Structures are given as structure tokens and as C-alpha cells.
Image (spheres, rainbow, N blue to C red):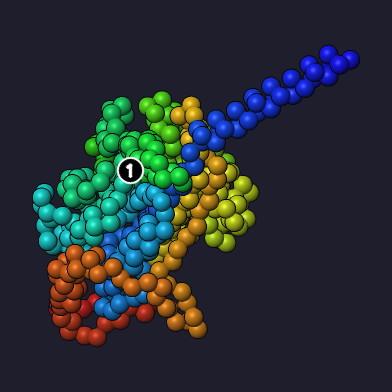
Amino acid sequence: MRYFLVKRAILGFLVGIVVAWQATAAWAADAIVKLRIMENTDIHVHVLNYDYYRDREDDSFGFARTATLIRQARAQAANSLLIDNGDLIQGNPMGDYTARESTLVRGQVHPVFKAMNLLGYDAGNIGNHEFNYGLDYLDIALSGAKFPYVNANVYHPDGQRNYFTPYVILDRKLKDEAGGERAIKIGVIGFAPPQIMQWDKRYLEGKVVAKDIVETARRFVPEMRARGADLVLAVPHSGMGLARRQAMEENSTFLLSQVDGIDAILFGHFHLQFPSDQFKDIPGVNLARGTINGVAAVMPGFWGSHLGIVDFTLALGGTGKWRILEQASHLRVVFKTEDRRRIPMVESDPEVVAAVKEEHEATLAFVRKPVGKTTAPIFSYFSLVQDDRPCKS
Ligand code: MN
Ligand code: MG
């Protein structure tokens, strides 16, 4: 009996030591790291908060405003990454002026990149509107970016070789919560809607082919993991879409949330906001956390109206394996509406404004230029019904 008690006491003591040792080891090995991912999308050349059609300022958009949100959000985070999701170089008179009037040549920097290069981007994805002026112009425009652009689902006509760099694996050093430095590999993969082949047929036919977004992700995401990516960010220029799989979906974000190995989805194209009530009826969506089927996701509006933020809390275990402890997303907005009036939430970033001053003034001169004279008054009230009266010649 006494022997049994002694045995139990010794056993209890030993178990205690093991438990304490494990707890210490776990405490010593698990580094906690917070990482913020920021996204903008569908800027459409709205570098400034200026409406060139109405020839006046507008407080509801403008990358100069988003830039201020970016600087604020970055200052609040121990670690952050900044990603552009395309539809960047087309969409307002500054885009048309740069492409068609100013004859941007290699070596010159497109105004969107004069602005964005100031903010320290980590990667960008190519949207459908990037193809609107043809592949040569796209190449010249992208050559002005001081950060890599990716696309995984556009190929040379052989359908084998990627036309762009499909993904990047960024080597980063992150600060852990105890002040130490931890190396991490962050994979960033991009996608464009395969419908670019119809939308920009005249520029793309015979030069490239586009493939299915989901199939492309299933092929490349495991490859990125095999090449050491600890975290994989998917950047589809593609809307939410449906849960039911067809093929060659224009909008693949929901389906991408079900592809193994993707940790966050930074999406766009539809000019909507996620998380927001615009998506409240979709099963699998958690608006409070900003997740789709448990995967953090964000879609930050358009023309720089919002900044998308995904916040991760990560743990680095003793084995060198990263785990996600928490993920959530939210949006920050450049304006609010009060009594039907738009109130700016932030000032324009002065560096961004200065960077495109010349292009802004050239665009103003371009849009203010008279295009001709009419011999009779004309209006467009009935333009959807029938042609205006013919001009007398
Ligand atoms: Mn767009
Ligand atoms: Mg688009």
C-alpha cells in the first residue's frame, strides 16, 4: 500500500515535470506575429479626387485619399503588405490622355505608378482593363512599376507558357510580438477574368489565351506551397460569383475560397464592397469577420473609395511551421455621407498630388480643348430613342 502511494507520488511528480517542460517549450517556441495585408482595386486612373468630365473635385474617390488611409493603416500595424488588384491604367481621361495623346514610351513612368511607387507596394495583379490599349502598351506601362505584377491564367498561344509571371513568393522578415524577427515566405498569385479574350479580342486574339481561374489556382497553389510559401494570398480581379461551378467563370472568388491552400482573397472587378451588406445573403459568408467559407476576403470598392484590410494573427511553432490563429477583414473609406453631403474622411496625400501635377494639368488641357463647332444646337435627351437631327453641311 505504501509502496503504491510512493509510486503514485513519483509518477505524479514526473508527469508534472513533463507538463511543465512542454508548456515552457511551447511558450518558448511559439512566436506570435501580427500581419496586415492592404488592398486597393479598380483605381481606373483616379489618382486624384478629380472628376474630369464635370471639371471639378469629388470627395468620394481618388488614390491620393486612399494613400492617406494606407499610411495610417500601415503605421498602426507591426507588419504589413500592400497589394494592387488592377483595373488601374484605364478608366478616365488621364488614362486616355496618357495612352493616346502623350505617347508614353519605355522609360517614362505612367502617372498611376508615379503615385503608387511612393507608397511601397509589394505586388500587383493585372485586371481586365489593363488590356484595353493592347499588350505592348501594357508592357510599357507596367515597366514603370517598382513592384512585381502577377497573372497566372493568361498564356502564350501554345497554352503552355505563362504570358506573365504567374505568382511571386515574397521573402519577408516580420516582427513578432516579443520584438524578435521572423522570416516568412508569402505567396501572391493573380488572376484576370478569362472573358478578356472577348472584351479585347482585337488586341488579344492570336497573341494570348486565357484559362479558367479555379483550375489555374488548383494547379499553382500546391506548387507555391511546395516552393515554401507559408502564406498564400490570391488576388483575383474577379467578383464574388456563385457557389455552383460551371467553367471559365468571370467571377470566381466564392469558388476560390474552397480551393485548398489559399489563406486570403483580395478581390475586385465588381466595384462593390466586401465585407458589407451587399453580400449578406450568401451562405458561407461571415460579414462580422469578413470571411468567405472561413477564408479572409476583402473587396475595396472602386476609384480608391476604400482601402481593404486583412489582419492575420499568426503563430510560428518550434518546427518552423506557421499557423493562422485568427483572420478578419474590414474596409476603410475615404468619405462619409451626411445630409446628402459628402464629407472627406482624410486629406489627399501631398506627395501623390505633387507626383502627378504635370499629368493632371495636361489632362485638364486635353478635356477642356474644344473638339469642334456645331451649326445648330444639339442635345442628347432622346439619344436612346433615335438619332439627333442630322447636322446641315
Ligand atoms: Mn474595374
Ligand atoms: Mg474589372
| Three-letter amino acid code at the position of disc 1 | Met
In the picture of the structure, the residue carrying the numbered disc 1 is 197
Question: Is the CB of the residue bearing disc 1 within 8 angstroms of ligand 2?
Answer: no
Determine whether, in the image, residue 198 is placed left or right of residue 230: left
Tell me the crowding category of disc 1: few under 14, some 14 to 19, or many 20 or more residues within 10 angstroms, Cα based: many
Position of residue 87 measured from the top left corner of the image (x, y, whole percent): 32, 54
In the current view of this chain or complex, which residue is farthest to the front? 2
Vertical relation: 8 (above or below) 136: above
Position of residue 369 measured from the top left corner of the image (x, y, whole percent): 15, 76
- What secondary structure is marked by label 1? helix
Q: Is residue 50 visible?
A: yes
Task: Classify the position of the N terminus by image quarter.
Answer: top right
Task: Classify the position of the C terminus by image quarter.
Answer: bottom left
Vertical relation: 199 (above or below) 16: below
The residue drawn where x is 50% and y is 45% is: 313
The image quadrant that residue 21 belongs to is top right
The residue drawn where x is 17% and y is 60% is: 98
Query: Which one is nearer the viewer's eye here, 163 or 32?
Result: 32
Determine whether, in the image, residue 210 is placed left or right of residue 391: right
The residue drawn where x is 46% and y is 74% is: 336
The image quadrant that residue 110 belongs to is bottom left
Position of residue 207 measured from the top left corner of the image (x, y, whole percent): 23, 37
